[in-house]
Amino acid sequence: MSALGDAQRTSSRVPPALQHHLPASSFFLPLAPCSPAPTVASGFQIVLYFICAFQNISCGIHYLASVFMTVSPYHTCRPPGNVSQVLFHNISSWRLEDIWILFFTGHEDQIIVQLQNGEVWELTSCHRFRRDEKSGLNSDYNGQKSSFPCLDGYIYDKSKWDSTVVTQWDLVCNREWFAKMVQPVFMLGVLLGAMIFGYLSDRLGRRLVLWSTSTGIFFFGIAVAFSSDYYSFMIARFLLAMSGSGYLVVVFVYVTEFIGMKSRTWACIQMHSFFAIGTMVVALTGYFVRTWWTYQIVLSTVTVPFVVCCWILPETPFWLLSEGRYEEAQRVVDTMAKWNRASSCKLSELLSLDLNGPVGNEPFEVKKHNLLDLFYDWNVGTRTLIVWLIWFTGCLGFYFFSLNSVNLGGNEYLNLFLMGAVEIPAYVFICWGMDSIGRRNVLVFSLISGALLCGVVMVIPKDYLVWTVVVTMAGKFAIGASFGLIYLYTAELYPTMVRSLAVGSGSMVSRVGSIVAPFWVSLSSAWTFLPQLLVGILAFVSGVLSLILPETMGMPLATTWEEAAKQDTEKESSGKLFPTTKNTALEKMEVIDSGVSGLGE
């Protein structure tokens, strides 16, 4: 169904008996392979975690690199010949370059130039007019004019950027929509890559997909910089998006299959923090490098350390066991035990023991489910629509705040840097809040706070730039927190048979939000605060509707619709669902955390 759906279907490929009866320690590889799951990960897991997390920085970079690559500077039509004299308002000069910068005030002013052949032209940002009657170089002209398109190109303001994609291929005026399509097409690649590589990781293994996508991120990133025309640039960016999205899908599954159960939720959510660091790197690089293709090359080199080191990554025993490759799985477990200075164990003995258990021979029927199952009844259908709205709002708000940071005023590089930096405490807040005050409470607080902050931004006077940035940062904090939490919360709201379908469908809905986010930013041309108003309304409605959803903190995973429906009542009465073999086994394995926390970017 989607990136997340493919990622979470990982566990479904393990033979049923193994899935329900193998101890979590043998799948998720704690300190000692035969001991109960630890509270923290050890040396082997820590090394793998940070190697994989480092590459998340590169993904965060490419997801938001277009913020500066597609900057559209002030511009004016280029005159059709050599200029002999220039007039702008009451300022006259012999060279266009001496006064044209004054033109960029945001108004529909015009520059009047006299060519060496005596013709007088009036230049605007998207049109140029030739005075048909003989005239001196003055602004008081009431005669006939002939309009001509800007066939000789444009002159651009280079005070901030020497070159961007827009200036490279003249993506302005009637070609402006080409520039606006850069980010939406990238997000389409994200969606497609998530589906393709999520599937391939189940068929070919996690390690191979990590290698191939990381290599693709590097080479396609370089290919973007050396694109000879707009269309090759878009194709390279699309393939880059597929590679980056494919990596994000697989790396969260990879990490969760190695990290101990008690550390898994924190580890997965904090993977988002490395993505946020990528946003900060974009801001720093944009500040120091002002030519778009050099900027792209510099950003692409961040992938090099991972490409050099990724060959040391082992395949996960989880996947090897699901494919029946027990000897290879045993070698990985032995290597891990050696690194962690712990005693290893024989997987063959462990598997034999569990498969001969009292329920080891229970028949297992695989029933296929579709999207209609998420509308099992009226209550479930209402829950699904609310969850989808939250997914859409979270993703739309997340990318809107990031992409719009360059339009806040002041230093756009500092603005984007702060939009990335504020995500890190947001994810720490999620980890603390969801186990302290509950998933639903954190979600409602984050969404309604985000809505109110959008309203506050609208009433701040234009001259108070610092306050505008501070409040916008707080809005990004709130929306980022809700977006980071919705993965885990969605998975806990649905029973086992449709869990991956629920999270996968939500991920696809959220991707619609990321695709429309660049167009959402453009709504400010109609009214400055229209985007904030609409995001605020969506966030407020989502927050209020979230109150209808049940709290899932401290509750075991539901395996049937009946158990899912009893989440509220059972928690109030006893704090747990009635124990069953299935939900007890699932609670021990905590498969809910397997990959659901990390595919939002």
Image: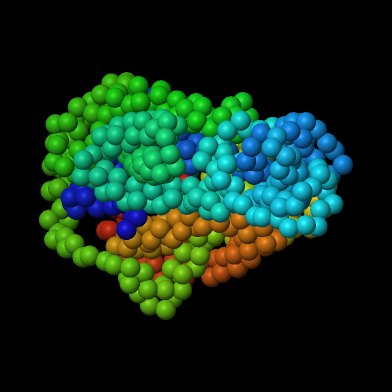
Q: Position of residue 67 (x, y in %)?
A: 57, 42
Along the line of sight, which residue is nearer the eye, 178 or 85?
85
Taking the spot 73% from the left edge, 58% from the top edge, the residue there is: 144
Q: Is residue 88 left or right of residue 183?
A: right
User: Can the viewer see residue 486?
Assistant: no
Along the line of sight, which residue is nearer the eye, 196 or 71?
71
Farthest residue toward the bottom? 378
Q: Please, is residue 260 above or below residue 309 in the view?
A: below
Q: Position of residue 184 (x, y in %)?
A: 47, 52
Q: Position of residue 310 (x, y in %)?
A: 33, 26
Q: Is residue 526 left or right of residue 150?
A: right
Q: Position of residue 432 (x, y in %)?
A: 56, 45
Q: Please, is residue 104 above or below residue 41 in the view?
A: below
Taking the spot 63% from the left edge, 33% from the top edge, the residue there is: 161
Along the line of sight, which residue is nearer the eye, 199 or 160?
160
Taking the spot 13% from the left edge, 61% from the top edge, the residue there is: 363
Q: Is residue 442 left or right of residue 129?
A: left
User: Can the viewer see residue 404?
Assistant: yes
Q: Is residue 206 left or right of residue 383?
A: left
Pick the quarter of the image with the N terminus.
bottom left
Taking the spot 65% from the left edge, 51% from the top edge, the residue there is: 127
Along the line of sight, which residue is nearer the eye, 144 or 164?
144
Label total for image: 0
